Structure formats: C-alpha cells, structure tokens
Image (cartoon, rainbow, N blue to C red):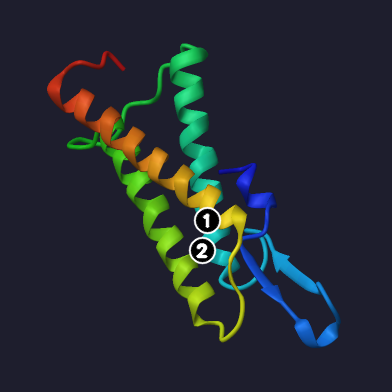
Amino acid sequence: MFIASFFDWWHFSLDNLGEGASAGYDAWGDPGSIWSTLAVVVSIILAGIIIATRLGKVQMPALPPNWTWGQVWGGGGATVVVLMLLKAWRILAYPYGGFGIGFWIGAFAAVAIAYGGYLLYNAEKTGASSS
C-alpha cells in the first residue's frame, strides 16, 4: 500500500492542451486525499504491528476487556477497505479523469490487508494463534 501511494491514483487527460498531455495525483493528493492518506497510514500501522509481533517477537500490550488483537487486525483491515471505497467515491465524483494504476494496486493491497486481518481474527477466535 505504501509503495502504491506514490503512483497515480487519479489520472486525467487534457487533450485540448496538446497531444498526449495528461496528469495525475497520487494517494497524497486530490481528490479525497484524506481518505487515501488515512488508508495508507492505517496500513502502515497494521504492518508495523504484524512485523513487531511476528518478526521482532514483541509482546503487544494488553487491551481493554472484551477486546483482542485479532479484532484490531480484522477491524483495521475493514477500515482500510472502507477508506478505499470513500477514495473511489471522491474519484468518481469528478466529471473528468478516472482511476490510475496506483489506485488499482492500492485496492488489491486493501483486499489483501482485509483478508489477512480476517485470517488473523479467525485464527485468534478459534485459538490457533498464540499471540
């Protein structure tokens, strides 16, 4: 998701400026930059948690009662998908232009993050995870 954030998420062509004139904005730019920025930040936070617990053998702090880290991962994955849908809504609201390659890579990453969050939540719920 982080790498995809630097590719064009919104791409448009201005034919009246000359042949081949086109431009685009990455995840950090308009339209709806807040949604894609939040999606990238949440993705980085989730990746940091996974890297710290799996590779760094870090013990995460205890959460409040009735909360588990599986729920955090599952909810984080769902949050990334919702933020990507909001970004898509803002892109579609513009009368010109469309989705760039970065958006599609980010959408694929969002689905992978959501699926991974679901797997971690499900593994914890069934007792297969020790973290």
Residue 75 makes an appearance in the image: yes
For mark 2, give the secondary structure. Answer: helix
User: Distance of mark 2 from mark 1, alpha carbons?
Assistant: 5 Å
User: Could you tell me the amino acid type at mark 2?
Assistant: Trp
Q: How many marks?
A: 2
Report which quarter residue 84 is drawn in: bottom left
Residue 58 makes an appearance in the image: no
Q: Residue at x 77, y 72 (%)?
A: 22
User: Could you tell me the amino acid type at mark 1?
Assistant: Leu
Question: Residue 106 location in percent, x, y?
Answer: 52, 50
Residue extending furthest front? 19
Instruction: Left or right? Give the position of 102 relative to 82.
Output: right
Instruction: Left or right? Give the position of 43 relative to 68.
Output: right
Locate the N terminus by quadrant. top right
Residue extending furthest right? 18
Locate the C terminus by quadrant. top left
Read off the residue under disc 1: 38
Are discs 2 and 1 less than 8 Å apart at CB? yes
For mark 1, give the secondary structure. Answer: helix
Which label was assigned to residue 35? 2
Q: Nearer the viewer, residue 13 or 86?
A: 13
Q: Is residue 96 above or below residue 12?
A: below
Q: Is residue 18 above or below residue 116?
A: below
Instruction: Left or right? Give the position of 101 relative to 116.
Output: right
| Label 2 packing within 10 angstroms: few (<14), some (14-19), many (20+) | many
Question: Residue 57 location in percent, x, y?
Answer: 46, 11
Q: Residue at x 60, y 55 (%)?
A: 101
Which label was assigned to residue 51? none
Question: Residue 34 location in percent, x, y?
Answer: 56, 65
Report which quarter residue 72 is drawn in: top left
